Image: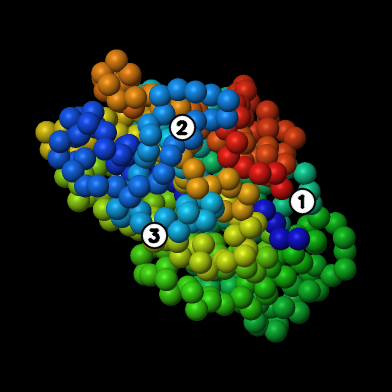
């Protein structure tokens, strides 16, 4: 059975949840953002409060026009949105908020590990393979700090070429080195050779052209190839920057929003039925101020949105405990208040979707609440 794969897309810079998923026809938002709230979003339908709760949820939320490629996944029930979500870090510092979120509340000085790494260390199953966790890019993110094994790569083809597995002499040498022994080192070597062979045989599909040429799309294409090759991929991380929109946000936000939506839509189309075994989590370290600034942008704020796409996601819904935008509801000095902790979302992914019985070790010191975002495996 193919591995269950988590793909974490981190929007570096603080993505504006009020622009990406704004309340429809909200006069308060128009007063706070007389310039930025002028574009009509794509209607999504009624908003859902978490099960058993009541509150002041807005009648309807919408999608930023540049996120239109995600509408088919939402309508098909494969994409869920969580709003007014964020961390307990109130510094509004990119560095502090990113570290806090990727380590899931565990400070670097107390335990140098990330939440994805702790999940990989505690999940039930065989030993992690050589490509169990992959960071697409040039460095290991904090979420994978202290993972059992992390491969950092920009291109699957580069990985295959660097292994030079097509060289018969090298293949004979590797076979002689690993032989028939059954200790962990020899078995890991044989697994690595087999994974490289599968990757070499797994070529991009015709649908891969939809990714385009931008780095984010190509990174998703690399993850899709790893999934199709069935190399045991359990976690992959991709960064997408461009969200720190202090200036001229109405135009500055278009490019990263379109890049995100087109990339995820291409990924879903490329994998097809294999998306059943994949969950994409889109998250960002902080939101933006509720009101626009003098430069027609937004400054660092608190709550934003998370997106969940893929297998087991109970999609077609926006889940929120909407805090409201009136002055008394905003968190000083004027931010959308965090009402859902991001660890509730991630803990439900790990515990419900992936079936972990050790969620408390992945998110130490946190008692997660139920949001009903996933069906069980």
State the image coordinates of residue 169 (x, y, percent, origin top left): 70, 82
How far separated are the C-alphas under marks 2 and 1?
37 Å
First-in-chain label (2 vs 3): 3
Which of the colour schemes (rainbow, by chain, secondary structure, one colour) is used? rainbow
Which residue in the structure is indicated by mark 3?
69
How far separated are the C-alphas under marks 3 and 1?
38 Å
Which residue in the structure is indicated by mark 1?
127
Q: Which residue is depicted at the point 36% across and 56% down?
A: 68
131 shown above or below 18? below
Q: Which residue is depicted at the point 18% across and 30% down?
A: 31
The residue mark sitting in front, 3 or 1, is 3
Q: Which residue is depicted at the point 16% across and 32% down?
A: 293
Q: In this view of the protein, which residue sits in the foreground, 303 or 82?
A: 82
Which residue in the structure is indicated by mark 2?
320
Whether label 2 touches label 3, CB < 8 Å: no
* Tally of marks: 3
Outermost top residue: 328
State the image coordinates of residue 325 (x, y, percent, origin top left): 30, 25
Q: In this view of the protein, which residue sits in the foreground, 229 or 121?
A: 229
281 shown above or below 301? below
State the image coordinates of residue 145 (x, y, percent, origin top left): 57, 41
First-in-chain label (3 vs 1): 3
Tag 3: Cα neighbours inside 10 Å, few (<14), some, or many (≥20)?
Answer: some
Asked where in the image residue 274 lies, by quadrant, the reply is: bottom right
Can I make out residue 95 in this image?
no
Quadrant location, the N terminus? bottom right
First-in-chain label (2 vs 1): 1
Tag 1: Cα neighbours inside 10 Å, few (<14), some, or many (≥20)?
Answer: few
Q: In this view of the protein, which residue sits in the foreground, 156 or 13?
A: 13
Q: Secondary structure at mark 3?
A: helix
């Amino acid at each position: 059975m193919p591995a269950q794969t988590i793909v974490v897309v981190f929007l570096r810079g603080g993505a504006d949840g009020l622009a990406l998923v704004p309340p429809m026809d909200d006069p308060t938002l128009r007063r706070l953002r007389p310039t930025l709230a002028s574009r009509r979003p794509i209607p999504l339908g009624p908003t859902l409060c978490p099960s058993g709760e009541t509150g002041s949820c807005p009648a309807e939320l919408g999608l930023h026009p540049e996120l239109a490629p995600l509408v088919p996944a939402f309508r098909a029930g494969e994409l869920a949105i969580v709003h007014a979500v964020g961390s307990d870090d109130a510094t509004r510092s990119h560095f502090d908020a990113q570290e806090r979120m990727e380590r899931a509340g565990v400070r670097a000085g107390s335990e140098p590990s990330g939440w994805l790494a702790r999940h990989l260390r505690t999940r039930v199953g065989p030993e992690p393979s050589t490509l169990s966790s992959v960071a697409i890019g040039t460095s290991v993110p904090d979420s994978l700090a202290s993972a059992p094994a992390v491969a950092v790569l920009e291109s699957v083809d580069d990985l295959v070429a660097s292994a030079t597995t097509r060289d018969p002499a090298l293949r004979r040498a590797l076979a002689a080195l690993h032989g028939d022994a059954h200790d962990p080192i020899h078995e890991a070597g044989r697994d690595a050779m087999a994974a490289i062979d599968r990757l070499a045989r797994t070529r991009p599909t015709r649908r891969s052209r939809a990714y385009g040429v931008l780095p984010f799309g190509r990174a998703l294409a690399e993850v899709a190839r790893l999934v199709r090759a069935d190399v045991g991929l359990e976690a992959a991380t991709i960064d997408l920057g461009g969200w720190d929109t202090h200036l001229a946000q109405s135009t500055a936000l278009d490019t990263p929003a379109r890049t995100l939506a087109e990339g995820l839509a291409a990924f879903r189309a490329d994998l097809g039925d294999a998306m059943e075994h994949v969950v994409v989590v889109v998250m960002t370290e902080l939101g933006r101020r509720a009101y626009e600034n003098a430069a027609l942008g937004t400054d660092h704020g608190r709550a934003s949105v998370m997106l969940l796409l893929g297998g087991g996601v109970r999609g077609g819904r926006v889940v929120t405990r909407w805090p409201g935008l009136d002055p008394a509801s905003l968190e000083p000095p004027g931010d959308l208040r965090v009402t859902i902790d991001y660890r509730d979302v991630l803990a439900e992914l790990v515990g419900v979707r992936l079936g972990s019985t050790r969620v408390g070790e992945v998110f130490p010191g946190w008692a997660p609440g139920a949001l009903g975002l996933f069906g069980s495996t």
